[in-house]
Image (cartoon, helix red, strand yellow):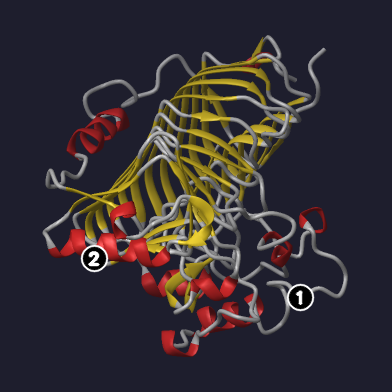
């Protein structure tokens, strides 16, 4: 017997065909154009080995100076490869410059310092959708063109319950009552106020005693970026964070990091992004597309758009591919193609999360050819009332529209096949599921304030949707 379905202020249409899904004007044609137009950066055939600049592979000596000298020399000569040979190299942050490929040979491990003072001087960066002066990301590039981090080596941030992670105020991450954290009034709450009232960057100086963790790899206002082949473990915070960047390829990267806010890849205010052939095993969202928080995002007003996820594997995480919650400037044209998602510790496959403080518009999320083994909560979750930290209600009602899932096969959908909640005054618009089979879900569908939902050749718990009572 089918379980109850909740339909509130919704109209569901069961049809045989969906216009503009497979013809030449379909979203998949746009996806192909985005992919075809993205090219890997190229570099001069010249190499500089960090060992020749004094690097010592003992896992103890701080090689920050050797990395800096090798990168500077390479830059002065017009670019090329900076090679990290086999061995364990300890360092502080690495700052890339234009036309440089940081190349990790097989057997190489870059081990990053966990001493916050090593991440001075403070740099222009971002934290949860708000810009600030803070600790340098572990690998950072600012206003650079034609840059890469490639190879077969490992990037180890060394974050743990003994460092970085307790700052999240998470008990499971080593925080105990009386310890400082990012949630203390002078830390993240203070940054939120700066972001909301538009305080200038020179007022937003954090760093020591403010407990806001650095991102791992951050191209900030960069173009033509490649991150390929490397394995990334034990991140302090967000792992790969292209911000205000364009033409970025993340290819064949393995991310295995289960700390707090350890999102695998977070494009923000960024355009023309290809994430392919990657494996995500994370403590937060595998991929989370961002576009600024609240008033800050509305002022910056740079959409994240033309983002393609192909041939990726999602294991643990809060969501496989997620939009939000920091998405106030808007997100459009997101494509997810030919991916697998499977773990008892993966909460959702596709998720959109926002609220009336965020505002913003999500327009165009297209998902096809996905194999889902198991998720905990839902295959598709759209929540326009997402809350975290404090009261998240406001006057900026978000909009979500044009969501397509086709050719999706799910063995265990968890609590819900589809879980969606919109506003009476701003219902979720135009949701289409075509050739979707969810073999098992405790509740088939729970939707509230969704307009124009079309279910084409879609079955949940063995029943065509028109037979679900």
- Could one spot residue 55 in this view of the protein? yes
Name the quadrant of the C terminus: top right
**Mark 2: secondary structure:** helix
Name the quadrant of the N terminus: top right
Q: How far is the residue under mark 1 from the one under mark 2?
A: 37 Å
The residue lying toward the viewer, choosing from 279 and 303, is: 279
- Could one spot residue 275 in this view of the protein? no
Name of the residue lying farthest toward the bottom: 203
Quarter where residue 458 is shown: top right
**Mark 1: secondary structure:** loop
Q: Residue 25: where, in percent of width, then height?
A: 23, 29
* Residue under the point 85% across and 66% down: 176
* Disc nearest the viewer among 1 and 2: 2
Q: Is residue 37 left or right of residue 368?
A: left
Q: Residue 369: where, in percent of width, then height?
A: 45, 20
Q: Which mark is residue 72?
A: 2
Q: Residue 363: where, in percent of width, then height?
A: 41, 47
Dot 1 alpha-carbon crowd within 10 angstroms: few under 14, some 14 to 19, many 20 or more: some
Dot 2 alpha-carbon crowd within 10 angstroms: few under 14, some 14 to 19, many 20 or more: some
Q: Which mark is residue 198?
A: none
According to the picture, the residue beneath numbered tag 1 turns out to be 180
Name of the residue lying farthest toward the top: 462
The residue lying toward the viewer, choosing from 254 and 91, is: 91
The answer to the question of whether label 1 and label 2 lie on touching residues, with beta carbons closer than 8 A, is no
* Residue under the point 56% across and 49% down: 263
Q: Is residue 40 left or right of residue 308?
A: left
Asked if residue 21 is positioned above or below residue 161 in the image, the reply reads above
Instruction: Give whichever of discs 1 and 2 has the lower sequence position.
Output: 2
């Amino acid at each position: 017997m089918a379980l109850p379905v909740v339909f509130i202020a919704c109209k569901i249409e069961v049809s045989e065909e969906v216009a503009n899904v497979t013809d030449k004007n379909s979203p998949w044609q746009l996806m192909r154009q985005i992919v075809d137009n993205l090219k890997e950066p190229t570099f001069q055939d010249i190499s500089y080995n960090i060992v020749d600049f004094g690097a010592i592979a003992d896992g103890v000596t701080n090689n920050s100076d050797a990395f800096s000298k090798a990168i500077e020399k390479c830059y002065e000569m017009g670019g090329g490869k900076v090679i990290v040979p086999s061995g364990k190299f300890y360092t502080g942050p690495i700052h890339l410059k234009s036309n440089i490929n940081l190349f990790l040979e097989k057997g190489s491990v870059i081990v990053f310092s966990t001493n916050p003072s090593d991440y001075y001087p403070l740099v222009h960066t971002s934290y949860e959708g708000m810009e600030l002066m803070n600790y340098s990301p572990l690998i950072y590039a600012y206003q650079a063109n034609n840059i890469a981090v490639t190879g077969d080596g490992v990037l180890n941030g060394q974050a743990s319950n003994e460092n970085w992670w307790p700052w999240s105020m998470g008990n499971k991450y080593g925080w105990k009552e009386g310890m400082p954290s990012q949630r203390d009034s002078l830390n993240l709450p203070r940054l939120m106020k700066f972001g909301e009232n538009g305080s200038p960057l020179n007022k937003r100086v954090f760093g020591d005693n403010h407990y806001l963790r650095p991102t791992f790899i951050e191209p900030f206002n960069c173009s033509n970026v490649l991150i390929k082949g490397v394995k990334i473990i034990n991140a302090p915070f967000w792992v790969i964070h292209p911000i205000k960047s364009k033409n970025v390829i993340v290819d064949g990267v393995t991310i295995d990091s289960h700390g707090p806010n350890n999102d695998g890849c977070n494009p923000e205010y960024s355009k023309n992004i290809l994430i392919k052939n990657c494996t995500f095993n994370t403590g937060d969202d595998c991929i989370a597309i961002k576009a600024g928080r609240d008033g800050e995002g509305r002022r910056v007003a740079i959409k994240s758009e033309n983002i393609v996820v192909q041939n990726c594997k999602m294991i643990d995480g809060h969501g496989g591919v997620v939009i939000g919650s920091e998405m106030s400037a808007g997100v459009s044209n997101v494509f997810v193609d030919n991916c697998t998602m499977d773990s008892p510790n993966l909460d959702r496959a596709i998720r959109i999360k926002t609220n009336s403080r965020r505002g913003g518009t999500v327009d165009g999320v297209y998902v096809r050819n996905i194999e889902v083994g198991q998720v905990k909560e839902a295959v598709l979750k759209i929540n326009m009332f997402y809350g975290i930290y404090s009261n998240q209600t406001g006057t900026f009602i978000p909009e979500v529209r044009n969501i397509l899932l086709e050719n999706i096969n799910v063995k265990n959908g968890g609590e819900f096949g589809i879980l969606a909640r919109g506003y009476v005054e701003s219902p979720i618009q135009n949701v289409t599921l075509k050739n979707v089979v969810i073999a098992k879900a405790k509740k088939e569908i729970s939707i509230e304030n969704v307009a124009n939902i079309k279910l084409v050749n879609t079955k949940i718990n063995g029943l065509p949707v028109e037979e679900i009572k």
